[in-house]
Image (tube, grey):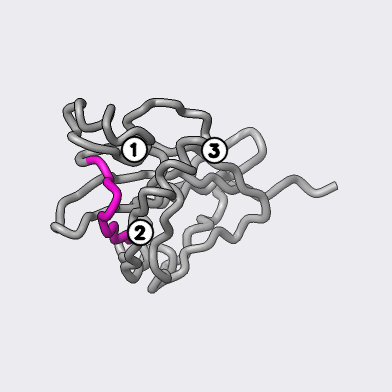
């Protein structure tokens, strides 16, 4: 017996629809506190004199700093009908460093949605792509996150 798809037409229509943009100012103090919080003592994140001697020419934000920035509201909600969810991981591509004083504008969209059979039944994969663009219109980074959901067995 063939299982009915969990992907509705409404969900399919949401693929590729970008959220509203939301801009964030990158502050020096936030960079330093973030590096301390993740336990990264690299002077490129907290010592202006040392950072000036690097190829970056000054303090830059740790790569995962961008994760602290949200996108604006979604124009279309794409939600799984299943009750259980897993984080399938993220992949990042970096193009430019984020620096103190930058304004980073963040948008996100559902880039893909598909199903696969799994041990616990049908699994739904939603791939979200988040783009981080600086005040000069240059792409700083792209994050692709995978959400996996499934219907847990009853009982």
Q: Nearer the viewer, residue 45 or 20?
A: 45
Q: Residue at x 59, y 61 (%)?
A: 81
Start-end of magenta stretch:
97-108
The furthest residue to the front? 49
Q: Position of residue 106 (x, y in %)?
A: 32, 59
Instruction: Name the residue that disc number 2 marks.
Output: 108
Give residue 45's quadrant in the image.
Answer: top left
In the image, 57 versus 18, the foreground residue is 57
Closer to the observer: label 2 or label 3? 3
Q: Are marks 2 and 1 in contact (CB under 8 Å)?
A: no
Give the structural element (helix, strand or loop) at label 3. helix
Which quadrant of the figure has residue 98?
top left
Q: Is residue 98 magenta?
A: yes
Q: Which mark is residue 37?
A: 3
Provide the residue designation for mark 1: 92
Front residue of 152 and 4: 152
């Amino acid at each position: 017996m063939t299982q009915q798809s969990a992907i509705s037409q409404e969900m399919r229509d949401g693929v590729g629809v970008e959220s509203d943009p939301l801009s964030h100012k990158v502050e020096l103090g936030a960079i330093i506190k973030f590096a301390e919080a993740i336990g990264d003592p690299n002077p490129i994140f907290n010592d202006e004199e040392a950072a000036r001697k690097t190829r970056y020419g000054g303090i830059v934000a740790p790569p995962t700093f961008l994760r602290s920035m949200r996108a604006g509201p979604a124009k279309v909600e794409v939600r799984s009908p299943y009750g259980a969810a897993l984080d399938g991981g993220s992949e990042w591509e970096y193009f430019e460093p984020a620096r103190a004083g930058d304004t980073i504008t963040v948008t996100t969209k559902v880039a893909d949605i598909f199903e696969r059979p799994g041990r616990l039944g049908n699994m739904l994969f939603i791939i979200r792509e988040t783009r981080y663009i600086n005040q000069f219109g240059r792409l700083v980074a792209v994050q692709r996150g995978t959400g996996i959901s499934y219907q847990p067995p009853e009982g």
